[in-house]
Amino acid sequence: MKISDIYRQQEQTFSFEFFPPKTDEGEKKLFETVHLLKGLFPSFVSVTYGAMGTTRDNTIRIVSVIKEEIGIEAAAHLTCVGQTRDEIEGVLGALWEQGIENIVALRGDPPKGETEFKPVPGGFRYASELVEFIRKHPTFSDSFSLAVAGYPECHVECRDKKKDLEHLKIKVGQGADVIITQLFFDNDDYFSFVDRVREAGIDLPIVPGIMPVTHGPQIKKFAEMCGAKIPPAMRDAIGRYGDDQDSVQSYGIEHASKQCEKLLKEGAPGIHFYTLNKSQATTEIYRNLGAARPK
C-alpha cells in the first residue's frame, strides 16, 4: 500500500526507520528487531540509503525482505549522493521490480570527510530535482508514493526559516505526498513549523520524527549534525547521568513518551520513530502511549 493512502485512511500512524547494517551480525540483529516491532503493528517502516554499491543494494534487498517476507509495508530512502540520473533510474527500476511502492526522497548528506554537498556530473543538487525526475519519468511517474523531509528548526545548511520554507514548497510542488520531519526535542518547534507550512498553502500530512535519547554522546552528535537544539533540561539530565546509560535511556523514554502524547493529542497525524535499529525504547514508548494494540 502507498503511504499516501495510509495517511488518508488511518487517523494516527506509527512508523519506524532503520538503517542497513554493514555486517552479517548487524543484519541478523536488524531483522530480529523488525520481527519484534512487527508486534506493534506499524503502519510502515523505512530503510535509509547509502549511495554507491553494497549499502545501496542492501537497502533495496532489506526493504524487499521486510515487505515480502516479514509482512510490513516498507519505504526505501533514495538520495542524490554520488549518483547520476541513469543510476537513479536503475534504482527506481529495481524497487519497482521488487514491488516497493514508497520512497523517501532526499538530497542526502555530503560524503564523510566533505563539508559541502556536490552533485556528481549528471546528478541532482536538490531533493526537489529528484522528486521532479521521478514524477516526470515516463515509466515510474505514478509508481511510487513520495515522502520528503521537513525541518522544524530549518535545514542545517539553511538557517533562514523563510528560505527553508520556500525550498519545501518547491519539493511539494514537484509532487511529494507526505512530509516527515527531522528529529526535534521541543514540540513548540514542530507546531510552529506546521503553522508556517499551512500558512504557505501546503496541506500534506506533516509527520513528526522522534528519536528517543538512549545514549548521551550519540544524541549530542545527531543533534549537531542535523541542527536540532537540545533543551536545557535534557542537556542537564544527560550531564547528570553521565555514563549511567540505563538512567539516560529511562529519561529519554520518558521525555519521548510525553513528547509523543502531546503531539498526537494536538493533531499530529502519527509518529515516525528513528529507531537506530533497536526495539526497546520504541516498545516502551508504545506501552506508555497505550498504542501497542492488536491490528
Image: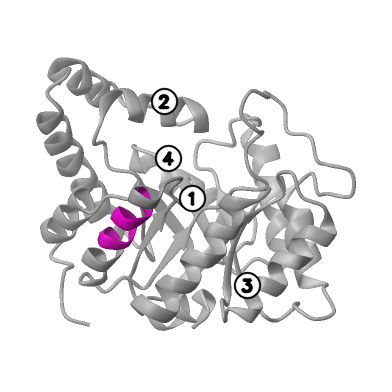
Whole-Å distance between the Cαs marked 3 and 2?
A: 32 Å
User: Disc 2 on helix, strand or loop?
Assistant: helix
Among all residues in the image, which is located at the extreme front? Answer: 24
| Label located before the other in sequence (4 or 2) | 4
* CA gap, disc 4 and disc 2: 20 Å
Q: CB atoms at circles 3 and 2 under 8 Å apart?
A: no
Residue 45 falls in image quadrant: bottom left
Point out the tag, 2 or 1, that comes first from the N-terminus.
1
> What's the CA distance linking mark 4 and mark 3?
34 Å
Q: Residues within 10 Å of mark 2 (few under 14, many from 20)?
A: few
Residue topped by disc 4: 189
Badge 1 marks a residue whose secondary structure is strand
Q: Secondary structure at mark 4?
A: helix
Query: Which tag is nearer the camera, tag 4 or tag 1?
Result: 1
| Between discs 4 and 3, the one toward the N terminus | 3
Q: Nearer the viewer, residue 109 or 153?
A: 109
Q: CA distance from mark 4 to mark 1?
A: 11 Å
Which part of the image, by quadrant, shows the C terminus? bottom left
User: What residue span does the magenta drawing correspond to?
Assistant: 26-33
How far, Cα to Cα, is label 2 from label 1?
Answer: 18 Å
| Coordinates of residue 91 in the picture (x, y in percent) | 70, 65
What residue is pinned by disc 1?
181
Which residue in the structure is indicated by mark 3?
A: 95
Q: Amino acid at mark 4?
A: Asp
- Decide: marks 4, 3 in contact (CB < 8 A)? no
Of marks 3 and 1, which one's residue comes earlier in the chain? 3
Q: Nearer the viewer, mark 2 or mark 1?
A: 2
Q: Are marks 4 and 2 in contact (CB under 8 Å)?
A: no
